[in-house]
Image (spheres, rainbow, N blue to C red):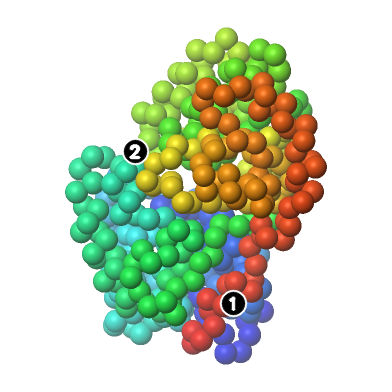
C-alpha cells in the first residue's frame, strides 16, 4: 500500500529483464515494502503491463545488444517514462543517461543512477565488447561524470567504485549485491538428484567457466560428481566454443548446461545453489573484475554452500573474516581442494549470515529526502 508523502518510483533499464535480481527483487521490492508505488520498465515477454508482488511491470519487447532498438532507446523510452508519471526514476542502464538528464532538466524528476559496473573500464577490458569500443572509454567517462553531477543520488553496486564519477560525497551510496530470497518461491525448478558442482553466472572466460571445466575434469575420474553450468552468454561465438568443449569430454554426459543463449530465472539459480555440493568462482584477475565482491559470494554464503574461488588477495582477506569457501587456482591439487570441503561446516558456522543479506533499511537511506 502506498504511504502518504512517499514519491512514486520507476526503475528503467534496457538490456536487463524487468525481473532482474537487483532491480526487481532487491530495489523495487524493498521500495514497495517501504510504502512507495513502484513501476519497473524492462525486457519482458508479456504483451501488456501487469502486476507482480504489488509492483507494476511495463514490458519492453526483448532485443539484443546490437539491435537498433538499443541505440534508439534513450528516445522511445523517454515517452514510456513520462507516461508512468513517477517522481523518482532509478536508471540502471548507461544507455539511458541522456533520458535521465532530460527527465531531470526539463521535467524536474529526481534521478538515482544505479551503477551496476564500471562501464568505462568494461569498454576497455571486457572481452564481450568489440575492439573498436575501447577508444570510447575516455569519452564515455567524461560524459558519465558530467551527467552524474546533475543527478540526485549515485548508488554503486561495489564499494570499489566509490570516487569513480567524482560527485559530492553526500550524494553517494553503496548498495552491494547482497542476497535476497524473495525469488526463492517463484516457480518450481527441478534439480539433479545426484551430487553436483555448480557454476552460475555469466558464461565468459574471465568469469571462470573454462577454469571450472578444468577443475571438474581433474576431479571427476576419482569423484563421480555431476557438473551443472547455469548462465547466459552474451557472446555467441564463445557459447559455441563452450558447447564444443563440453561435447568433446569423455564424461560429457555428466555435464548439464542450463541457459546458454537465454537468461536463467533467478529462482532457478537459487534452487540450484541450494541443491549443490559446492560452487565454483574461478574468476580471472582482469581490471574489469579487480576489487569486486560478486553477488555469487553472498548467495552461496547466505544459503550455506561453499565456493571454490580464485585466491586473489582481496578475496582471501574476505574469506578470513567471512568464510567463503576454498581457494584454488590452476596448478594446485584439485584432490586437496576437494578434501578441504570436509572442514567447511566448521568454518561456515562462524559466519554472520545477516551480513550477507540485502536490507530495506539501506534502500530507505537512499530514498531519504527525495520528494
Say the numbered circle drawn on residue 209: none
The residue furthest top is 250
Assign the N terminus to one quadrant of the image. Answer: bottom right
Q: Label 1: state its secondary structure.
A: helix
Mark 1 lies on residue: 364
- x, y percent for residue 344: 75, 38
Q: Are marks 1 and 2 in contact (CB under 8 Å)?
A: no
Q: Residue at x 38, y 32 (%)?
A: 236
- Look at the picture and state if 222 lies above or below 69: above
For mark 2, does the 10 Å Cα neighbourhood hold few (<14), some (14 to 19), or many (20 or more) residues?
Answer: some
Q: Residue at x 45, y 58 (%)?
A: 160
- x, y percent for residue 67: 30, 47
Q: Residue at x 61, y 57 (%)?
A: 178
- x, y percent for residue 117: 41, 55
For mark 1, does the 10 Å Cα neighbourhood hold few (<14), some (14 to 19), or many (20 or more) residues?
Answer: few
Q: Residue at x 64, y 77 (%)?
A: 34
- Please tell me which residue lies in front, 260 or 313: 313
Is 368 on the left-hand or right-hand side of 153? Answer: right
The residue furthest bottom is 5
Is 72 on the left-hand or right-hand side of 205? Answer: left
Can residue 48 be seen here? The reply is no
- Please tell me which residue lies in front, 15 or 356: 356
- Please tell me which residue lies in front, 240 or 344: 344
Say the numbered circle drawn on residue 127: 2
The Cα atoms of the two marked residues, 1 and 2, are separated by: 36 Å
- Please tell me which residue lies in front, 274 or 256: 274
- x, y percent for residue 4: 61, 89
Is 216 on the left-hand or right-hand side of 142? Answer: right
Which of pointers 1 and 2 lies earlier in the amino acid sequence? Answer: 2
- Total labels: the figure holds 2
Q: Label 2: state its secondary structure.
A: loop
Amino acid at each position: 500500500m502506498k504511504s502518504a508523502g512517499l514519491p512514486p518510483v520507476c526503475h528503467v533499464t534496457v538490456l536487463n529483464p524487468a525481473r532482474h535480481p537487483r532491480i526487481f527483487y532487491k530495489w523495487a521490492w524493498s521500495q514497495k515494502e517501504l510504502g512507495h508505488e513502484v513501476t519497473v520498465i524492462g525486457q519482458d515477454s508479456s504483451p501488456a503491463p501487469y502486476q507482480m508482488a504489488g509492483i507494476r511491470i511495463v514490458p519492453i519487447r526483448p532485443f539484443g545488444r546490437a539491435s537498433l532498438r538499443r541505440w534508439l532507446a534513450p528516445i522511445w523510452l523517454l515517452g514510456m517514462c513520462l507516461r508512468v508519471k513517477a517522481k523518482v526514476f532509478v536508471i540502471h542502464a548507461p544507455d539511458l543517461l541522456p533520458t535521465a538528464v532530460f527527465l531531470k532538466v526539463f521535467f524536474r524528476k529526481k534521478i538515482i543512477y544505479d551503477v551496476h559496473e564500471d562501464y568505462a573500464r568494461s569498454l576497455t577490458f571486457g572481452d564481450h565488447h568489440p575492439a573498436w569500443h575501447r577508444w570510447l572509454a575516455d569519452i564515455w567517462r567524461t560524459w558519465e561524470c558530467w551527467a552524474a553531477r546533475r543527478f540526485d543520488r549515485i548508488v554503486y553496486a561495489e564499494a570499489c567504485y566509490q570516487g569513480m564519477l567524482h560527485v559530492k560525497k553526500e550524494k553517494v551510496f553503496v548498495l552491494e549485491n547482497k542476497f535476497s530470497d524473495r525469488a526463492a518461491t517463484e516457480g518450481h525448478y527441478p534439480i539433479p538428484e545426484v551430487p553436483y558442482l555448480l557454476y552460475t553466472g555469466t558464461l565468459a572466460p574471465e568469469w571462470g567457466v573454462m577454469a571450472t571445466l578444468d577443475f571438474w575434469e581433474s576431479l571427476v575420474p576419482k569423484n563421480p560428481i555431476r557438473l551443472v553450468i547455469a548462465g547466459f552468454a552474451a557472446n555467441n561465438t564463445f557459447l559455441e566454443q563452450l558447447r564444443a568443449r563440453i561435447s568433446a569430454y569423455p564424461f560429457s554426459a555428466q555435464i548439464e548446461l542450463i541457459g546458454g543463449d537465454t537468461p536463467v530465472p533467478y529462482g532457478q539459480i537459487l534452487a540450484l545453489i541450494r541443491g549443490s555440493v559446492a560452487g565454483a568462482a574461478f574468476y580471472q584477475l582482469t581490471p574489469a573484475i579487480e576489487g569486486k565482491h560478486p553477488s555469487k559470494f553472498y548467495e552461496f554464503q547466505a544459503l550455506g554452500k561453499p565456493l571454490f574461488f580464485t585466491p586473489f588477495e582481496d578475496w582471501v582477506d574476505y574469506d578470513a573474516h567471512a568464510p567463503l569457501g576454498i581457494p584454488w587456482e590452476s596448478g594446485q591439487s584439485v584432490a586437496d581442494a576437494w578434501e578441504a570441503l570436509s572442514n567447511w561446516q566448521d568454518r561456515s558456522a562462524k559466519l554472520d549470515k545477516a551480513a550477507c543479506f540485502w536490507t530495506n533499511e539501506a534502500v530507505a537511506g537512499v530514498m531519504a529526502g527525495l520528494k
